[in-house]
Image (spheres, rainbow, N blue to C red):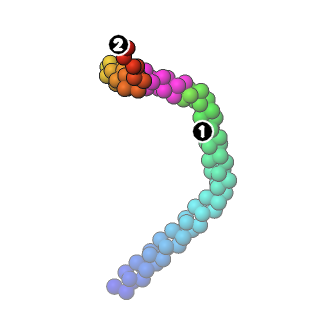
Amino acid sequence: MVELVVALAFIVATLALVGLVAGFISFVFGLIALPFKLLGGLVGMLAGGLVMLILLPILFVGGLVGMIGLTVGFFALLVPALPIVLLVALFVWLARRPAQPRRA
């Protein structure tokens, strides 16, 4: 029975040592690969900026088309209100007009 406990203790110690060595090797290779990861991130950021510069004129034209479309839509909604606006303008003009004396 004691032999079984000692064997299990050796197995656990061996597994702990193997895990420690694997972690150390992973850490060393991670440090070696770190500059390449940073360079890859920089290249990815530059590529994203280049794509944005290429798409900027397309976004500008899309914004211009949207602005024109909203303006046309606003005037299309304003057309049905035009008779009311003209009536109000007529009443305001009549109210502000100077009174002319009557000639008898």
Specify the principal SS of the magenta part: helix
Q: Position of residue 58 (x, y in %)?
A: 56, 26
| 22 left or right, relative to 36 | left
Give the residue drawn at x 44%, y 74%: 11
Name, please, the residue furthest toward the bottom: 2
Q: Pointer 2: what residue? A: 104
Give the residue drawn at x 37%, y 86%: 2
Whether residue 66 is in magenta: the answer is yes
Disc 2 marks a residue whose amino acid type is Ala
Viewer-side residue, 43 vs 28: 43
Above or below, 38 relative to 8: above
Q: Position of residue 49 (x, y in %)?
A: 62, 38
Number of numbered discs: 2
Name, please, the residue furthest toward the front: 104
Residue 96 appears in the picture as rendered: yes
Give the position of the N terminus as an image quadrant: bottom left
Q: Nearer the viewer, mark 1 or mark 2?
A: 2
Q: Secondary structure at mark 1?
A: helix
Viewer-side residue, 48 vs 38: 48
Above or below, 70 relative to 22: above
Read off the magenta span. 61-72
Give the residue drawn at x 63%, y 51%: 37
Give the position of the C terminus as an image quadrant: top left
Q: Quick one: label 1 or label 2, which is nearer the N terminus?
A: 1
Q: Pointer 1: what residue? A: 48
Q: Quadrant of residue 21?
A: bottom right
| 43 left or right, relative to 87 | right
Are the two marked residues, 1 and 2, in contact with CB atoms closer than 8 angstroms?
Answer: no
Q: Secondary structure at mark 2?
A: loop
Give the residue drawn at x 48%, y 22%: 68
Residue 79 appears in the picture as rendered: no
Disc 1 marks a residue whose amino acid type is Gly
